[in-house]
Amino acid sequence: MNIYDKAHDLAKALKESKEVEEITAAMKLIETDPEAKQMLNDFRQRQMEVQQRMMSGDMPAQEEMEKMEKLFEVLSLNLNIRRLFDAERRLSVIIEDVNKIISDSLQHLYGSSM
């Protein structure tokens, strides 16, 4: 059994998943709506900036986090953006589950302290 072949099989299965198809379809619809596309791009940019700051240890103020939540809620009123967010969330759950399966399979190497 070649682990890399299995990883490529998993990557192919993810690419062909319903969740990725829905993300692609939602993105195509958003592309046809310049206002929604711009709002989403702005949100993604702000989200990335906040995440980078958090990774460097600079925690954003509560007010800033609340502002991001409100912006997320406003964006979610757009049906195509909500469809995108929902599909992205479902794909994220799948990836987390796969990571857990892999981690759990190696837990015996490190004992039960994980």
Image (cartoon, grey):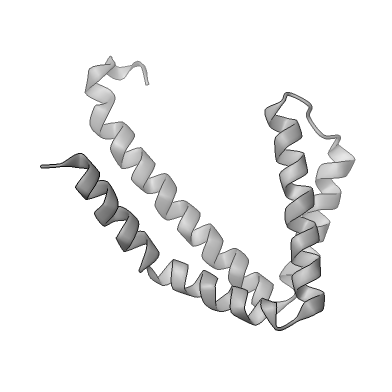
Question: Residue 4's x, y, as percent?
Answer: 24, 43
Residue at the far right in the pictured view = 63
Question: Residue 26's x, y, as percent?
Answer: 59, 76
Q: Nearer the viewer, residue 79 or 46?
A: 46
Q: Is residue 24 above or below residue 61?
A: below
**Location of the C terminus (image quadrant):** top left
**Location of the N terminus (image quadrant):** top left
**Could you tell me which residue is drawn at 77 percent across and 74 percent down?**
36
Q: Is residue 66 left or right of residue 26?
A: right
Residue 78 figure quarter: bottom right
Q: Is residue 38 above or below residue 106?
A: below
Residue 75 figure quarter: bottom right
Q: Nearer the viewer, residue 108 or 43?
A: 43
**Could you tell me which residue is drawn at 54 percent across and 58 percent down?**
89
**Could you tell me which residue is drawn at 29 percent across and 16 percent down?**
110
**Could you tell me which residue is drawn at 27 percent across and 25 percent down?**
107
Residue at the far left in the pictured view = 1
Question: Residue 86's x, y, as percent?
Answer: 57, 66
Question: Residue 15's x, y, as percent?
Answer: 38, 64
Residue 103 figure quarter: top left
